[in-house]
Amino acid sequence: MKEIQFEQIKEAVSNGLHKACCSLSCSVLNKIKEARSLETSPLAEATFDQIIENAEIANEESLPMCQDTGIITCFVEIGYDVHLNCDLYESINEGVRDAYDRYYFRKSVANPLSRINTKDNTPAIVHVKMVSGDKLKIMLVPKGAGSENMSKLKMLNPTDGKKGIVDFVVSAVKEADGRPCPPIYLGIGIGGNFETAPKMAKEALARTSRSEDKEIAELEELILKEVNKTGIGPMGLGGKTTCLDVFINTYPCHIASMPVAVNIQCHANRHVEVVL
C-alpha cells in the first residue's frame, strides 16, 4: 500500500500548474508550427508567428502565456493500492492556492451571484475515479473563460445520426468565431446523459491521439475537416486552420436520446498530468 501525504499532492499540483500555464506542450507547439507551414495568407502567417513568439517568451521568462490562467479542473485517478493520509480536495486546493500566489497568476474564481472573488482561485473542480494500481494521477486543466463560454451541449434525437453531430459541432464553432482564440481544439462527448457528456468532452481535450475505435476516429477526422472549411482561421482573422485537432469520447446512452457536448479549447490547450 503506497501512502501519499498532503505536501506531496500540494507541491505536485502547484508545480504542474506552473508548467501548464507557462509552457506549451511539445505536441501542441508542433501542431501550431505545422499549421503555420500550411497557411498562404500573410495575415494568417503573421498571426501564427505571434502565437509562436508568445509561447517562446512565456517559456523562457517563466510567465503565463495568457493572462487568463483559468479555473482549474482536475481529473483524478486513485489506484486501489493508494492510501491518502490527507483530504484529497484540501490538498489539491492548497496546491492551486500556492501556485496562484507563488507565480502571480491571475485569480479569476468568484461567487456566481455576488461576483465576489475568492482571492486564491479556489475551489478547483475535481472529478475522481478509482482504478487499479498504486499510483495517484491528476490531470490538471486550467481553462479560461474565452473558450469555456463558447462550449455547447445539445440533446440530439437519435435519428439525427452522425450528420446531426457534425452539423451541431460546426454550428458551435461558427457561433464562437474568433472569441475562443483559434486555432482551437475540440473535445466532444457523445452519449451518457445530460451531465456526463460535458465531462467527457472536457476530458477528451487531454488526449493526444486518435480514438482506438475506427468509427470514432473517422468521425474525429471528418469533424476536423468540416470545421477547417469554415475559414475562421487563427484568431478569427481568416485562414486554412481553424481547428488543430478533434478528440471524441463516448458512452452508452438511453435509446431515446443522444447527448452531444462540445468543449472548445484555445490553441494552447493547457493541461498537464502529475503522477505520484
Image (cartoon, helix red, strand yellow):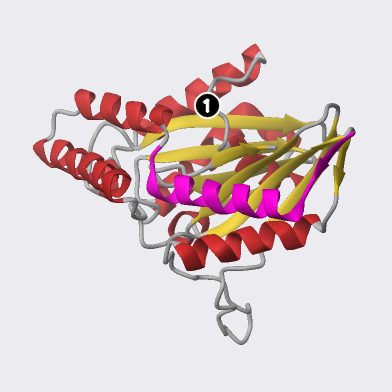
**Residue neighbourhood size for the residue with mark 1, other residues' Cα within 10 Å, grouped as few (<14), some (14–19), many (≥20):** few
Quadrant location of the C terminus? top right
- Position of residue 151 relative to residue 276, above or below, is below
Residue 11 drawn above or below residue 133: below
- Image-based side of 11 in relation to 259, left or right: left
Residue at (34, 32) in percent of width and height: 29
Q: Amino acid at mark 1?
A: Thr
Q: Which residues are magenta?
A: 1-24
Residue 121, percent across and down?
56, 68
Residue located at (67% from left, 62% from top): 93
**What residue is pinned by disc 1?**
208
Question: Residue 89 falls in which quadrant of the image?
Answer: bottom right
- Residue found at the very far top of the displayed protein: 214
| Image quadrant where residue 49 sits | top left
> Residue 100, percent across and down?
50, 64
Residue 40 location in percent, x, y? 14, 28
Count up the numbered dots: 1
Q: Locate residue 183 relative to residue 168 in the image: left or right.
A: left
Point 56% across, 17% down: residue? 218
Q: Is residue 256 visible?
A: no
Was residue 6 drawn as part of the magenta stretch in this picture?
yes
Q: For the stretch drawn in magenta, what is the main secondary structure?
A: helix
In magenta stretch: residue 122: no
Mark yes or no: residue 43 visible: yes
Q: Is residue 64 left or right of residue 48?
A: right
